[in-house]
Every structure is written in C-alpha cells, then in structure tokens.
Image (tube, rainbow, N blue to C red):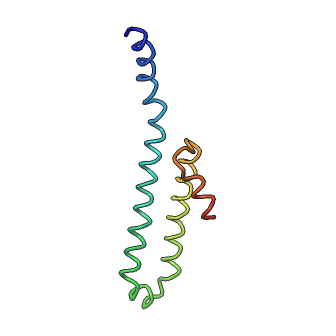
Amino acid sequence: MIVALALVFPLAITGPRFFAPRVAEESYRKGEESNVLSFLRENLSAQILVKTFGLADYSRRGFLDRLDVLRERMVRVGTVGDSTGYLPMLASSL
C-alpha cells in the first residue's frame, strides 16, 4: 500500500503541470474557433448589406485574419502536444 502511494503521489503532483498547458491552449483554440464561426454567421446573415455597400473585401479580409489567428493557435496546440490530433488535421487541410 505504501509503495503504491509512493508511486502515485508524485504523478498526482506532476500530472497537472504536464497537462495544464495543453488544456489552456485547447481552450483558447476553441475560443478562436467560435470567433471564426460567429464572424462567418454574421456575414452570411448580412450578405445583402455586404453586397449592397461593397464590403466584400473588408469582410473577406476580416475572415482571413481570424483564420490566421486560428491556424496559429492550432499549430501551437499541435506543438504543445501533438497527441490531440490537430496537427495531422491541419497538415491535411493545407
């Protein structure tokens, strides 16, 4: 029993330090993903206004900027821990 505790206790202390950066990056990635999706939803719902006032370039630039931020976040998540599986997904989408 004491031997088991001696093995488990160090893992319980170091485990969160190992997984916390991955979890934080994943959380930020999900936030960036939701920013891209909400921007896309807004532009699709206001498509008539975008076409009427000639805001297509502005809209496209904003969307691509958000995609760049998301891509950087996905690469960062992949380099922090490629066990999440996003790095192969990102490479296949390029």
Looking at the image, residue 43 lies above or below residue 1: below
Q: How far across and how far down the image is residue 67, in percent?
A: 52, 64
- 58 horizontally vs 34: left or right: right
Q: Residue furthest top?
A: 2
Is 92 on the left-hand or right-hand side of 45?
A: right
Q: Which residue does the image show at 41% across and 63% down from the upper left?
A: 35
Q: Position of residue 59 (x, y in %)?
A: 48, 77
Residue positioned 46% across, 24% down in the render: 14
Quadrant holding the N terminus: top left
Query: On the rendered structure, is 61 left or right of 40?
Result: right
Q: Which corner quadrant of the image does residue 51 belong to?
A: bottom left
Q: Nearer the viewer, residue 12 or 53?
A: 12
Residue 16, compared with residue 44, is above or below; it is above
* Residue at the outermost bottom position: 52
Give the quadrant of the C terminus. bottom right
Looking at the rendered structure, the number of numbered marks drawn on it comes to 0
* Residue 28 location (% of width, % of height): 44, 50
- The residue shown at (52%, 59%) is 69
| Most foreground residue, 62 or 88 | 88
Give the residue displayed 47% in from the left and 83% down from the top. Answer: 55
Q: Position of residue 16 (x, y in %)?
A: 42, 30
